Image: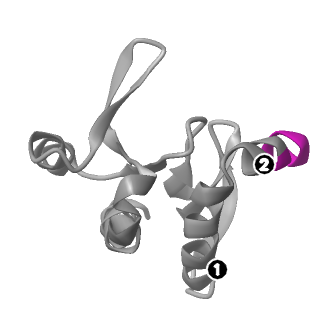
């Protein structure tokens, strides 16, 4: 993971400049750590990932399906499609909306925390 992670960090320094300080703050909380997610590193709560940087340098978060639809309809996020399969509870947010990343990560945390034993 270190090699892939280093290469991704070099390819998307802006994304990690946004994500890393947010992640550092979140990892001070109980039950939150950094872990593997789709070949990337992401924030997880009790082992369940709720936010990470994608292969394209965007923020990817896990939210309720209805919230993903709401954000997509408002043009604030894109639903995730992996290998042709829609990921109903996952959305991406670009670096152009970096000011919203902390708020959206907080939403994702609240969602995953509530559904993770």
Q: Is residue 48 above or below residue 40?
A: below
Name the residue that disc number 1 marks.
24
- The answer to whether residue 46 shows anywhere in this view is no
Q: Is residue 34 above or below residue 86?
A: below
x and y percentages locating residue 35 in the rendered image: 69, 57
Q: Magenta segment: does it hold 2?
A: yes
Question: Which type of secondary structure does the marked residue at label 2 adopt?
Answer: helix
In the picture, measured across the screen, residue 43 lies left or right of residue 83, that is: right
Name the residue that disc number 2 marks.
10
In the picture, measured across the screen, residue 22 lies left or right of residue 102, that is: right
x and y percentages locating residue 12 in the rendered image: 66, 48
Quadrant containing the C terminus is bottom left
Residue at image position (70%, 37%) is 39
Q: Is residue 93 above or below residue 45?
A: above
x and y percentages locating residue 90 in the rendered image: 35, 41
x and y percentages locating residue 95 in the rendered image: 45, 54
Local packing at callout 1 (Cα closer than 10 Å; few below 14, some 14-19, many 20+) is few
Residue 98 occupies which quadrant of the picture? Answer: bottom left
The mark that comes first in sequence, 2 or 1, is: 2
Decide whether the magenta segment is chiefly helix, strand or loop: helix
Question: Which type of secondary structure does the marked residue at label 1 adopt?
Answer: helix
In the picture, measured across the screen, residue 48 lies left or right of residue 79, that is: right
Q: CA distance from mark 2 to mark 1?
A: 19 Å
Q: Which residues are magenta?
A: 1-6
């Amino acid at each position: 993971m270190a090699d892939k992670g280093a290469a991704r960090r070099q390819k998307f320094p802006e994304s990690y400049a946004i994500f890393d300080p947010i992640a550092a703050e979140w990892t001070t909380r109980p039950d939150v750590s950094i872990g593997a997610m789709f070949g990337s590193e992401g924030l997880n709560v009790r082992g369940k990932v709720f936010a990470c940087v994608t292969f394209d340098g965007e923020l990817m978060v896990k939210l309720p399906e209805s919230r993903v639809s709401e954000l997509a309809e408002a043009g604030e996020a894109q639903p995730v499609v992996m290998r042709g399969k829609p990921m109903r509870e996952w959305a991406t947010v670009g670096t152009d909306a970096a000011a919203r990343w902390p708020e959206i990560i907080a939403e994702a945390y609240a969602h995953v925390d509530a559904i993770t034993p």
